[in-house]
Image (cartoon, rainbow, N blue to C red):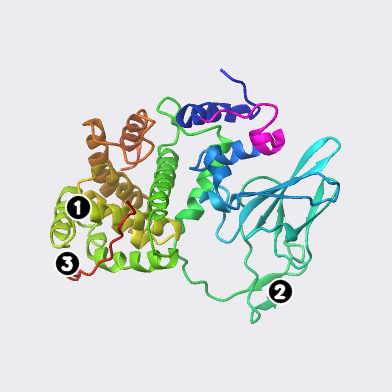
Amino acid sequence: MQSHQHGVRSLLAVWHEEATGVRTPNASGYAGMPVEVSQAIDEVALSSEPSAEQLMQRSGFIQLVDLNGDGKTDYILDTSVTGSSFWCGDQSCTVMVFASSSQGYKRNDFLTNDATPAMFSCHQSVCRVSQSSTTQVVVAPQPTPVINTPPPSTKVSNQNAGNGLNGITLFNTGPKEAAARSLASHCSKVSLLTSSNGGFMTVSNMNDPELAMSEQFCLARTYAIGTGENMTSALQGVTAAQVDQQCDAFGPALAPYVGKLGTTDAAALTGEVQKFVLTSNMSIDQLANTAKICLFSGYRRDQMDVALGLALLMVGLGQKPYGELVGHHVAQGYGAAADPERAQGWYMMAIEALEGGAEAAFAPGQPERVALLRAAVNRAPGGLAQPQPAAALPTFKLGE
């Protein structure tokens, strides 16, 4: 077995190589690139859906430029093209800048959007951002929280001066409105915990079933995004904005069924969604393709009503492994009221389908994942408006 330089992450590296067929770069690096850059590409690939080879083929992932004027090529890796919440926060993504020096290449990490070479200047191997840029320097290759500056009308209170806070100024922002929960932000935190723990939990080392299920939720989300992204790229004559706009129609159309998740068991609600499918005037394949594309659209934009509705629709289309997604949403309260006990029916629908030979919708190369889901479920705590007519819902025709 080939050795790795990532410590406890080496097991993840070996799994990734076996699953994707992509080998760790040799001393010369990928395509002749420096080994430091090649190792960073592997690091990004380990915590995102695309393989290292697929990442290198994505436009904008690698930018080549001489940033320090020494006549040697420097490299910029922009993780925004990965679609991974591990590398991206709500407003920015990690950008790695590799500047050449006599000792090799030094990595500088930043958080920014739309990275361009003009943003960065380097003296030898130390890089900075232009004064006009809002880019932030980070000390680790992972997203960090974004601090929201108080609005201009915010009043400053000095009433705590001299007390136990040592005169730290507090901001009186007034009543705070409840913000919608962000699954992307949740998965970013879960990814950091997974990385610090040395990899995903397994049946043998599962000491926290709720974290294990969060890991699998975020993994399934990543696969759903990857599947839909690939299908979207085959669409002809449709922009990303048009896809998102049309997919938003599924939110209100499926809202009556999403609203019943807290009161109706999995089998009964699946039957109701199947009736919705029968009245849609679309073929099963046409509706399934559209649902997968819109599931990607919903997760990419953190639109939980769209994502959860489409997961329900996939179950109604006979794809019972998608019941896992519904279970995760219900158990953790994303797009529906949290109800861990009600979620178990959806989990078991998916698990029993997979154990019965159904094709896996997520991580098909990990057959042991079914046993992990069952173990985690066993250990975990345990009339709306009439549906809208479905005839006017959008569909997408994939290119031949």
Q: What residue is disc 2 on?
A: 159
Q: Which residues are magenta?
A: 22-38
Which amino acid type is shown beneath numbered disc 1?
A: Ile
Residue 62 position in % (x across, y down): 64, 48
Which amino acid type is shown beneath numbered disc 2?
A: Gln
Q: What residue is disc 3 on?
A: 383
- Calculate the distance from the C-alpha at mark 1 to the C-alpha at mark 3: 28 Å
Which amino acid type is shown beneath numbered disc 3?
A: Gly
Q: Are marks 1 and 2 in contact (CB under 8 Å)?
A: no
Q: Nearer the viewer, mark 3 or mark 2?
A: 3
User: Given the current orientation, which residue lies at the most extreme front position?
Assistant: 400
Residue 183 position in % (x across, y down): 45, 54
Q: What residue is disc 1 on?
A: 284
> Where, by quadrant of the figure, is residue 377 drawn?
top left
Q: Residue at x 64, y 82 (%)?
A: 153
Q: Earlier in the sequence, mark 3 or mark 2?
A: 2
Whether residue 283 appears in magenta in the rendering, the answer is: no
